[in-house]
Image: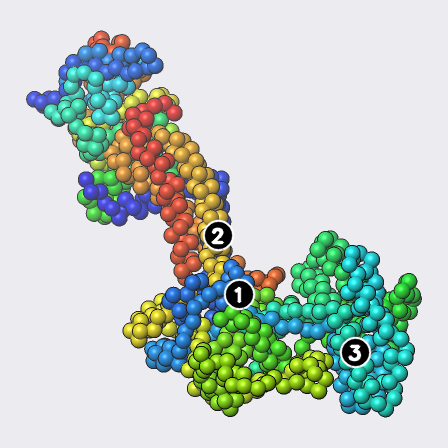
Amino acid sequence: MAGSPLAQARVLAQMALRSLASHKVKSLIVGSIMVFGTALVVVGTSLLDSVEAGMERSIVKSLSGHLQLYDAEAKDDLALFGGATMGGDDYGEVPDFGEVQRVVQAQDGVEAVVPMGLGIANMSRGSELDRALDALRRAVEAGDAATREAMIHRVQRLLELTRADLTNSRAITADTTDLDANLAHVERAQQAAFWAPFRGDDLDAKRAALDFLDTQVAPAGGDGVQYYLRYLGTDLPLFARVFDRFRIVEGEPVPEGRRGLLINKRFADSQLKLKVARLLDDLHDAVTLNDARIADDAALTAKARQARSLYGSLTLMLAPEDAAALEAALRAEFPDVAPTDGQSPLDALVQAALTVDDDTLKARYAFFYAQIAPRVALYPFRVGDVLTLRAFTKRGYMKSVNVKVYGTFEFAGLERSELSGAANLVDLMTFRDLYGQMTEAQQAELKAIQAEVGLERVDRADAEDAFFGGDGDSVEKTADGSVFGDFDVARIEREAGTRVADDRPFTREQMVDGVVLNAAVVLKDGVDLDDAQARIQAAVDAAGLRLKVVDWRAASGVIGQFVMVIRGVLLLAIGIIFIVALVIINNSMLMATLERVREIGTLRAIGAQRRFVMAMVMLETLVLGLLSGTVGAGLGAALVSWMGSVGIPAKNDILVFLFSGPRLHPAVGASNLLVALVVILVVSLISTWYPARIATRVQPVEAMREA
Amino acid sequence: MSAPIAADPIVELVGVSKDYPLGKLTVQALRGVDLRIERGAFIAIAGPSGSGKTTLLNLVGCVDVPTAGAVRIEGQSTSELSEKQLTTLRLHKLGFIFQSFNLVGVLDVFQNVELPLLLQGGLTGAERKRRVAEMVDKVGLTPQTRQRPNELSGGQRQRVAIARALVTRPAIVMADEPTANLDSTTGGAIIELMKDINREDHTTFIFSTHDANVMSHARRLVELVDGRIAADHPVAEAD
């Protein structure tokens, strides 16, 4: 009864193959679906694996490391690339990074443990008038007549604009008291007599005029611009060493033991850069990288229109000699441009240079960067500047820190990715200052100051005596009888304006032994992530550190789950295709079975058991599945290797991040092929199960029916 | 030369009835048939269409079981067997020859003949091949061994079917109108072939026919009318 299994299998396989060959159309249709499905699985899973690997590289090698450690009792999940709230996330804190580093570094396979702390600071740039006045004051103090005249000219132009602004505001304001006062100050400053002292020798008269401008006129000129800066405080030299995507673009790395800020190039380009330059960059990227057309895209058209309207912001920034040179260059380029009402010839020319459409964009973009950009400040900072960062500390008060910009950086391969612009880098000491944590040195310094000023603990009962003395008039009066002398407000503001960086050096111990918010663990090559995560978690638990260890996926926030979402979508698509395939295969096999009722009946009559019939029908689809699967997997693999050699261009910023570079070079793995084959075979079996069941129910009597 | 008469019948039908539902009606295809067939018989079942020839063959061929009465093959009542056991019985004791040949189109002559042996199992590959080759030779198709059914004539196809039916050396061969789709010359040759095998191997042949020429080759003729045996008599050998 057992039959000859091997010989039976052989004849069944032969029957299956020949049956497929004799039903060419059916086999071709079902086979094509299977080929397509298998190829899709191979291509889809290969792409996803490559994207996941790319994203892992992007995230691991730029910010997160393989693992992240942070406070086990943190209220929010760590989100290095930005969480749900704008910087309001509470990640708890790691009070002593040194201890963490010692414990974790001792584990096998750990390359480095990098301290980190995320925060958001605000940074402001004064108004154009503020900066022109600042430059004028420096020129006056330095006795630089040429710059002085240029700046006087500039200030006068800005005053004209300020006056126009105020006049316009006045027309739409009910209570014009303040505006009238401002307007009076501006108008006074516009009189020729006001500027006479600048050409004289009386330095005090010049200073008095400058003080008037600073205190009375400048406030009418607007508040300037505020920027928000997401920063990551870290051990900068270590960060640069272990995150191999990190690369200095301009300037230099912050030296060991020094405070400093490195500005993210991507952040600078997308957030800080002069608006008109950003608009042109966007247009240029859209046209050159994405083959978009300005005329066909409402958003691009609007950007082009906006760029054209911003000529005034450029001409205002120009120094007189630059203005003259630029005007000459522009006149050569646009000989026929004439100014409209209220425009200077330069305004009209710059406007012409900023007027772009699909035909002129490339040339005008190049012209902008060749002629205009070098003459204006594209960014609100220059390498070497000292910036004031303000942030709310942990304890809720505002803290300002002056920090020097050493340079700009980018993450190699991710230059165009918005997400790689997620954070700027500062040294850990600056981070702690902004965070509100005093170092031991600062605490010592504070104590020293307290000692120096003779601060002592005073009981409440004795407080009055201690503060005001036992008797007598302890309040000094100034000569004119007022309690406080006239503060030289202008001078104080001026001094605040000339920022001095906090440049106290620090030792490695000072940096390491202190608070951080989180720490990145970079593993050596080939170390198993899950295993390392478990070991490190066990080690920190054993050391009594209340920390949780998460992998890069979890640490990167929403973006880390991105691949899982895409995988879900792909699985759904594959699922739908296979359900369709299932229905079609099922149908066509059912038809085939019904056509073969007499043959099946005959087999049953001459002694074939039901399972033989079952095997016969199933094997047919299985053989088709195996053949189509092999062809499909081969096609898929060929397609993936072709994509791998050509590369898939990352058309937008998110793709650049996901691809970990401007192009994705996917590779097919054995697992992709195996999964595809298994899937297609399973689908074959499931789809044929019902037709096969029907086949087994064919009665042997069917053999006797007339053909 | 006449076949030896065995004491026990190889096939025995006792009071066999077979009803088929046909919509709301019931068709009584057989109505109380009693029949004994001895080992080595060469028997024709004749009768007009709808007389119950095929039903009788189906019951004896164990592809169907009676509604009432008993069909015994070598003493074993088919009603008492499971479907699986009936299949095994067919595989080992019965051979089938069909009116429309019913060969497996995708298999060649050799493979069609080999199929029942593969289902049976138990033979070595070499032995199986020898048996198949011998059988193909016996039906005179050795030159066509590797051809597929659609490359053969009707007579050749029926020879393949005969070889397939006989390769397992069954006790009984059932043939349902084996010559109905053949011209009279070819049909005659097929009957001669069956007759030769019957003489040599004493295989029992039971075939249905309404062809008088074919009937004349049988040694015994059972005539059915309306599901009942109308006549049952020996036939003089037509030599």
Q: Cα distance, mark 3 to mark 2? A: 67 Å
Name the element at disc 3.
helix
> Marks 1/2: CA distance?
33 Å
Q: Nearer the viewer, residue B103 or A296?
A: A296
Mark identifier at residue A87: 1
What residue would you read off at disc 3? A212
| Amino acid type, residue under disc 2 in the picture | Leu
Q: Are marks 3 and 2 on the same chain?
A: yes
Residues at discs 3 and 1 in contact (Cβ within 8 Å):
no
Say which amino acid is labelled 1. Answer: Gly
Q: Left or right of A555: which side holds A265?
A: right
Quick check: A383 above or below A414? below
Residue plotted at (56% across, 72% down):
A398
Instruction: Give the labeled residue for mark 2.
Output: A570
Colouring method of the image: rainbow
Question: Which callout, 1 or 2, points at the residue further toward the start of the chain?
Answer: 1
Name the residue furthest left: B7
Looking at the rendered structure, the kind of residue marked 3 is Phe
Callout 3: chain: A
Say left or right for A560 vs B142.
right
One can see residue B212 in this view: no
Q: Quadrant of residue A369?
A: bottom right
Q: CA distance from mark 3 to mark 1?
A: 40 Å
Of the two numbered discs 3 and 2 in the rendering, the one whose residue sits closer to the viewer:
3
Q: Nearer the viewer, mark 3 or mark 1?
A: 3
